[in-house]
């Protein structure tokens, strides 16, 4: 038996031990963010409790369509793979494609930018976007598009470095957005979001939406 085989066996045994008894061996993920369809960064050890590596590719509207990517560590309970679309107003939307995985460096690759469909589907939701406050009262309706069949109300804090600000937003969302729960910590290219509130209900037909 060669040395490398023995090392492989040891590594395997160690990995198994970590997995089976959760010895607290922490996960390493690639960490980066940028205004592109992908990004490359250093491998970092995740904080305790963050057991998932993530890639989130987003497209939002900011004086035009704007694509960005974040790679980070997350808690598995906060990481929801796949496509999410939200619309807060005619030129205020965000679509994301999320990839979650649970082994060292597993988020080194890239995922396709989210596909989206901006065709109005006849549903609407109370809408608002409020910085620096964590509640928002709505006076407007957002017209839902594509597969957005639900209304969401997200509020909490957005942190960037040492800066932290309250935010609140309401609008249309795909049902997949309802997986977000209060207490979730969600990275993005510009902010780290701490959700204090994540309400979700089915969208109503126009004229019947309650503000
Ligand atoms: C886009 O969304 C509209 C409204 O839900 C739907 O009728 C249409 O089939 C969708 N188009 C595609 C290409 O999915």
Image (cartoon, rainbow, N blue to C red):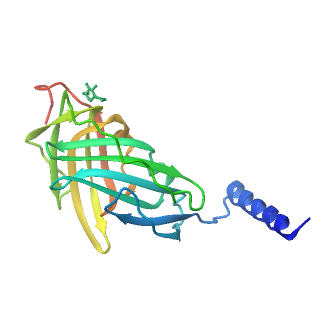
In the image, farthest residue toward the bottom: 162
Residue 101 seen in the figure: yes
Left or right of residue 87: residue 22: right
Q: Position of residue 142 (x, y in %)?
A: 15, 38
Left or right of residue 122: residue 3: right
Q: Position of residue 14 (x, y in %)?
A: 74, 63
128 or 96, nearer to the observer? 96
Q: Position of residue 125 (x, y in %)?
A: 18, 35
Label tally: 0
Left or right of residue 186: residue 102: right
Residue 184 seen in the figure: no
Which quadrant of the figure contains the C terminus?
A: top left
**Residue occupying the point 37% across, 58% down:** 69
183 or 164, nearer to the observer? 164
Image quadrant assignment for residue 18: bottom right
Image quadrant assignment for residue 153: top left
Q: For ligand 1, give the image quadrant.
A: top left
Seen in the picture, residue 138 relative to 46 is either above or below; the reply is above
């Amino acid at each position: 038996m060669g040395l490398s085989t023995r090392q492989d066996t040891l590594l395997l045994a160690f990995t198994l031990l970590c997995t089976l008894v959760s010895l607290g061996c922490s996960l390493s993920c690639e960490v980066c963010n940028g205004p592109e369809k992908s990004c490359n960064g250093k491998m970092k050890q995740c904080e305790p409790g963050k057991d998932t590596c993530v890639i989130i590719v987003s497209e939002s509207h900011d004086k035009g369509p704007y694509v960005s990517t974040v790679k980070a560590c997350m808690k598995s309970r906060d990481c929801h793979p796949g496509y999410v679309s939200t619309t807060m107003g005619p030129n205020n939307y965000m679509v994301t494609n999320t990839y979650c995985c649970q082994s060292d460096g597993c988020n080194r690759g890239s995922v396709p930018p989210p596909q989206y469909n901006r065709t109005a589907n006849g549903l609407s939701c109370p809408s608002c976007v409020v910085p620096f406050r964590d509640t928002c009262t709505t006076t407007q309706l957002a017209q839902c598009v594509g597969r957005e069949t639900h209304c969401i109300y997200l509020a909490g804090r957005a942190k960037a470095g040492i800066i932290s600000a309250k935010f609140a937003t309401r609008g249309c969302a795909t049902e997949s957005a309802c997986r977000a729960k209060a207490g979730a910590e969600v990275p993005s290219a510009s902010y780290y979001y701490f959700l204090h509130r994540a309400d979700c209900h089915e969208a109503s037909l126009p004229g019947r939406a309650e503000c």
